[in-house]
Amino acid sequence: MKILISTRSASGVHSAKLTSFAQGVTVCGDEAVLDTDDSQNCDLAVIYGSVKPHRGRAEQVAKTKIVKQFKKFVQIETQLVGRRMNADADEFRVGVDGFMWDTADWGFAHTDQQRTKHFFNRFDYPKREQWNTAGEHILICMQKYGDASLGTVDTYAWCMDTVTELRKHTDRKIVVRPHPIYRKKDLMEQLRTTLLRLPNVEWRNTDIKEHGEPDIAQDLENCWCTVTYTSGSAVDSVLQGVPNIAMGTGNMAWPVSSHSLSDIENPHRGDKTDWLNKLALCQWSTKEFNSGECWKHIKKSL
């Protein structure tokens, strides 16, 4: 196979991650070409990041062109487990034709318990097999305004609607956790002011520029349940044994979450084994890019 590796689809240090992926393609005996203008002769393309065709930056132009041209493409996106906000991350989710639970082909037919064990052993926090059955507050995890995983959903309106609906089903304290990268601060301040007028609602100050990288583990302590749309915080929550209500089908914790706010007092606490095995196939390290291990798995879905 001849694979187009589009370093033009990435910026800064992320371009180097694509170069690592190209090395793994070559190790496996396939041909990797970087940003060729002869893309018509390539069988598949690899891009970094979400596609936003309405934006005019060079990376978005490159990605939009590729998605229109190729029947299949590999999409590399931000990591799910052990997430960090800094740009020099060493772990990434990798899917075929997408990066969300319900849109990408993750190769779930090829789960391997040894892969699962190896994957989770490289993270330095305990994975709780059992669900918490206690806890006091509800944690609403907002997302970055305009994030591709939200689709057309306005994270501020969604949060307000969520708080309003939750109050029909529970009197528990509600803690609102905005995304650490603040956007549309005027809208955020309006939301914060409105929410703090309501009884038993708290607001977390998480601005990464002011407070550094916030640790969600603190908010998950003594947490009864989280509520997310497609936030990666859902993965943190479930791994720590805190039930989650997922409101978007692309949520990476969708199979192990409730899907209705009316379930808040009795959220899903089913078996997580199958989901853990599948999650281990969604994320790969740059070391696994270089070795070709990631590419070997991806090829099974082509």
Image: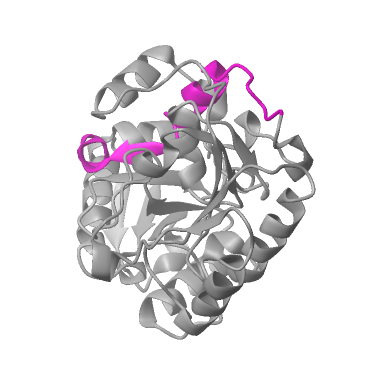
Is residue 274 in the magenta section?
Answer: yes
Q: Nearer the viewer, residue 126 or 21?
A: 126
* Residue 263 relative to residue 14: left or right: right
* Residue 164 relative to residue 107: left or right: right
- Residue 154 shows in the view: no
Query: Above or below — where is 214 with respect to 181?
Result: above
Pinpoint residue 245: horizontal percent, then vertical percent: 64, 40
Q: How many marks?
A: 0
Pinpoint residue 210: horizontal percent, then vertical percent: 25, 69
Residue in the image at 46% along x and 69% along y: 63
The residue segment tinted magenta is 266-291
Pinpoint residue 36: horizontal percent, then vertical percent: 32, 69
Residue in the image at 48% along x and 22% along y: 277
Residue in the image at 60% along x and 16% along y: 271
Pinpoint residue 66: horizontal percent, then vertical percent: 49, 67
- Residue 93 shows in the view: yes
